[in-house]
Image (tube, coloured by chain):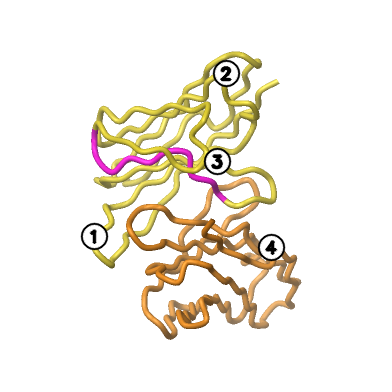
Amino acid sequence: QKEVEQNSGPLSVPEGAIASLNCTYSDRGSQSFFWYRQYSGKSPELIMSIYSNGDKEDGRFTAQLNKASQYVSLLIRDSQPSDSATYLCAVMGTGGFKTIFGAGTRLFVKA
Amino acid sequence: DGGITQSPKYLFRKEGQNVTLSCEQNLNHDAMYWYRQDPGQGLRLIYYSQIVNDFQKGDIAEGYSVSREKKESFPLTVTSAQKNPTAFYLCASSFVFQGNFNYEQYFGPGTRLTVT
């Protein structure tokens, strides 16, 4: 069974700090990686996608991918209370459609 | 505005009744998906469809059925055979996977189904 693992948290950081969210996956052939943000009671919202090893930056968000270690992370700089949410890591493996979602990490940013 | 709509937002049913959840998209996406989310768990794939008149079972298809008669629409029926139907149901869509490049999935607002 292909898996995506995340620490459930909660991860608590002070306002203005860097929040670091981590994810590991089991399918070594995975090609595509996504981070979604989900506020309580709402649907997931795509915030980052990454396909190649290295870093990808978008505003305050940086996604990092290391395929050799089967590890993907999301850094949130200058964290704000509005960033408090559950962050879902999603991985698309080889051969097509199925995207596997992790259970998510709850982030709490303290004002 | 382009997007994905799901209706209703909340749905209450008695045990033993079938219920159909609506999902419509105007993003011109080829593929559509249904997921189920239970508290504290990740999203689990119920069904997906890459093209009109074709769909495939996901990981937890038992007790569910779908149709894809139009590109824009992918309704999900929760049948009385589904043992634990109470959950948050999410519809998503994307362009079709091509080679090594995957198009991102975008989600509708969800339908919260409660069966008593």
Q: Is residue B44 magenta?
A: yes
Could you say whether the residue bearing mark 1 is in a helix, strand or loop? loop
Badge 1 and badge 3 both on one subunit: yes
Q: CA distance from mark 4 to mark 2?
A: 34 Å
The chain letter for the residue carrying disc 2 is: B
Q: Which residue is mark 4?
A: A106
Question: Given the image, on which type of amino acid does mark 3 rest?
Answer: Arg
Q: Is residue A42 magenta?
A: no
Kindly indicate whether the residue at mark 2 contacts the one at mark 3 (C-beta within 8 angstroms): no
Could you say whether the residue bearing mark 4 is in a helix, strand or loop? strand
Label 4 vs label 2, nearer the camera: 2
- Check residue B98 in the rendering and tell me which mark sits there, or answer none: 1
In the rendering, at what x and y percent does residue B43 appear?
55, 49
Q: CA distance from mark 1 to mark 3?
A: 25 Å
In the rendering, at what x and y percent does residue B83 appear?
63, 26
Counting other residues with Cα less than 10 Å from the Cα at mark 1, is it few (<14), some (14-19), or many (20 or more)?
few
Label 4 vs label 1, nearer the camera: 1
Q: Which residue is mark 3?
A: B36
Q: CA distance from mark 1 to mark 2?
A: 37 Å
* Span shown in magenta: B43-52
Could you say whether the residue bearing mark 3 is in a helix, strand or loop? strand
In the rendering, at what x and y percent does residue A89 appear?
54, 64
Which tint was used for chain B?
Answer: yellow
